[in-house]
Image: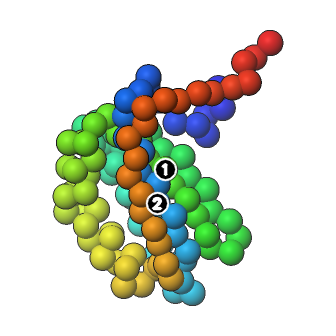
């Protein structure tokens, strides 16, 4: 498997889909995004993440979590809360967040 894909267990698990459009003032954003990725990976119940951003500043990050409790703990993380505040005040022109319970998952094509 390609290492750009998160190593996912069999369902069920949770996916948080975060879509964002950066503002014109994105100074410091890359460093904060890298810090949040590293911090998330330290959290109990974190499974992995997949993230992309295009040249116009539109990005999607999907993070995966073992259960709703792990996800709630990440939402309450003090450093994560501070990053969210900065994002709302400075870095994001717009964002959308969706939380999903993954009940089925497929991958392919099968290697021959």
Residue at the image point whose x is 53% and y is 30% from the top: 105
The residue most toward the front is 103
Could you tell me if residue 30 is visible in this image? no
What label sits on residue 62 in the rendered view? 1
Q: Nearer the viewer, residue 30 or 68?
A: 68
Q: Position of residue 11 (x, y in %)?
A: 41, 27
Asked if residue 8 is positioned above or below residue 91 in the image, the reply reads: above
Residue 12 in sight from this viewpoint: yes
Q: Which residue is mark 2?
A: 18
Quarter of the rendering occupied by the C terminus: top right
Question: What quarter of the picture does the N terminus occupy?
Answer: top right
Q: Residues within 10 Å of mark 1 (few under 14, many from 20)?
A: some
Q: Residue at x 69, y 25 (%)?
A: 108
* Residue displayed at 38% across by 41% down: 101
Relative to residue 26, is residue 75 depicted above or below?
above
Q: Residue at x 37, y 34 (%)?
A: 13
Q: Do the CB atoms of the residues marked 1 and 2 lie less than 8 Å apart?
A: yes
Q: Secondary structure at mark 2?
A: strand
Vertical placement of residue 79 versus 41, above or below: below
Quadrant housing residue 44: top left
Q: CA distance from mark 1 to mark 2?
A: 6 Å
Side of 60 where 40 appears, left or right: left
- In the depicted view, which residue is nearer to us: 32 or 8? 8
Disc 1 element:
strand
Q: Position of residue 70 (x, y in %)?
A: 24, 42
The disc, 1 or 2, on the residue closer to the chain's N-terminal end is 2
Residue 5's x, y, as percent?
Answer: 58, 37
Label 2 neighbour load within 10 Å: few <14, some 14-19, many 20+ = some
Task: Please indicate whether residue 110 sits to the left or right of residue 39 in the image.
Answer: right
């Amino acid at each position: 498997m390609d290492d750009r894909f998160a190593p996912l267990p069999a369902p069920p698990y949770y996916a948080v889909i975060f879509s964002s459009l950066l503002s014109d003032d994105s100074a410091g954003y890359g460093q904060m995004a890298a810090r949040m990725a590293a911090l998330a990976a330290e959290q109990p119940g974190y499974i992995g993440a997949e993230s992309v951003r295009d040249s116009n500043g539109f990005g999607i990050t999907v993070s995966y979590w073992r259960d709703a409790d792990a996800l709630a703990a990440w939402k309450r993380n003090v450093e994560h809360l501070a990053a969210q505040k900065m994002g709302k005040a400075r870095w994001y022109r717009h964002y959308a967040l969706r939380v999903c319970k993954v009940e089925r998952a497929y991958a392919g094509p099968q290697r021959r």
